[in-house]
Amino acid sequence: MKIIGIVLVALGVLALVYGGFSYNRDRTVLQMGSMEMTATENQTVPVPATVGLVVLLGGVALIVFEKRRPRSS
């Protein structure tokens, strides 16, 4: 659980700092017989600040809960 909490904290911080992520997508613009023309489009996916904050707080809660949980042998 602690590792999941750390990953969630990192993702939450990244979401708050960058506000989203981008990726490239190739699409076919023209196709004539065996000849094909493609174009690369840059797509951006925004991540709302509230989502980043919720993920960050969830990660912190997992880390804190892991420390308080008694270990069983």
Image: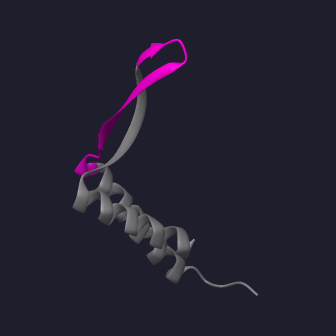
x then y, percent, for residue 4: 53, 68
Query: Is residue 59 depicted above or below 50 in this figure?
Result: below
User: In the image, what residue occupies the spot 49% across and 20% down?
Assistant: 35
x then y, percent, for residue 56: 35, 63
Main secondary structure found in the magenta portion? strand
User: In the image, what residue occupies the spot 39% across and 71% down?
Assistant: 60
Is 68 on the left or on the right of 48, as rendered? right
Q: Quadrant of residue 18?
A: bottom left
User: In the image, what residue occupies the spot 57% across and 71% down?
Assistant: 1
* Nearest the eye: 28 or 45: 28
Q: Residue furthest top?
A: 33
Which of the colour schemes (rainbow, by chain, secondary structure, one colour) is used?
one colour
Is 53 on the left or on the right of 28, as rendered? left
Is 16 on the left or on the right of 34, as rendered? left
Q: Residue furthest bottom?
A: 73
x then y, percent, for residue 49: 23, 51
Region rendered in magenta? 30-50
Query: Is residue 72 depicted above or below 61 in this figure?
Result: below
Q: Residue furthest right?
A: 73
Q: Quadrant of residue 15?
A: bottom left
Q: Quadrant of the C terminus?
A: bottom right
User: In the image, what residue occupies the spot 51% across and 83% down?
Assistant: 67
x then y, percent, for residue 27: 42, 27
* Nearest the eye: 8 or 60: 8
Magenta highlight on residue 59? no
* Nearest the eye: 9 or 69: 9
* Nearest the eye: 51 or 65: 51
Q: Quadrant of residue 53?
A: bottom left
Magenta highlight on residue 38? yes
